[in-house]
Image (tube, rainbow, N blue to C red):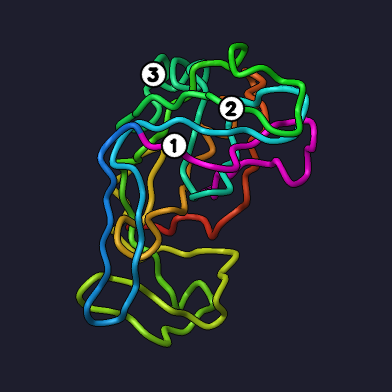
Amino acid sequence: MIYEVIDNTPNERKWTSAISIHPRSRMIAWSCPDCGTATSYPSGSFDVTIEGGEAYPDILGCGAFPFLILSERVIDSWGNHNIGTFIKFPVGVTKAHETDLSPAGAPQFFRIEVVGNAKIDILSSGGKIKQLCFRCGTLRSEPIVIKKFAFLPRSWDGSAVFRDQLLYPNVIFCTDAVKRLTEHENHSNFRFEEMWPMTEGC
């Protein structure tokens, strides 16, 4: 089975989350001359301000940008079990808002850029492509939010953690091995949403 992996902060209010980002690496900013899409985000490391909650989780929700931010505990566990291929950048906690948590007590967090790849099949996922920018890859679908993704045959590279690098780079998927490890080691604040299983030939 394949899952989308996300933080469960909306359903577990005990966990704090990041509400703003303070870059300490070069900012990447671009706008597409064809479709007008624009974005700006840190190229590497950054610090965050946390808000609410009463404890630090192993996966830190980030309202400022949909980064995958994991604790060092998770990173070490994934490394010990050969889970995924990814690039990591340190994330520090420097400010706290509406919480008794101290930034000094935060675990070491890392922003994760997933290398594993698969291609999403929009039509098999129940969506229709309304607009696709061939310059930057920005996709507009109907419905706007697709909750259960399917994948194009033979597009998955076999990685335990992966994403569609072009169409949905901020949606992270994983195999059942990651879910089992998370549950076995009690990594906190993870949520796994079932996707369509990979078919033969993927």
Q: Are marks 2 and 3 in contact (CB under 8 Å)?
A: no
Which residue position holds label 1? 22
Task: Give the crowd class for mark 3: few <14, some 14-19, many >=20 residues within 10 Å.
Answer: few
**Picture residue at 48% right of the left edge, 17% below the top:** 72
Badge 2 marks a residue whose secondary structure is strand
**Of callouts 2 and 3, the N-terminal one:** 3
Front residue (pair 129, 53)? 53
Badge 1 marks a residue whose secondary structure is strand
- CA gap between label 2 and label 1 equals 10 Å
**Of callouts 2 and 1, the N-terminal one:** 1
Q: Position of residue 24 (x, y in %)?
A: 34, 31
What amino acid is at disc 1?
Answer: His
- CA gap between label 3 and label 1 equals 28 Å
Total residue callouts:
3
For residue 35: magenta? Answer: no
Q: Position of residue 167 (x, y in %)?
A: 35, 65
Left/right placement of residue 63 relative to residue 84 reads right
- CA gap between label 2 and label 3 equals 29 Å
Which residue position holds label 2? 95
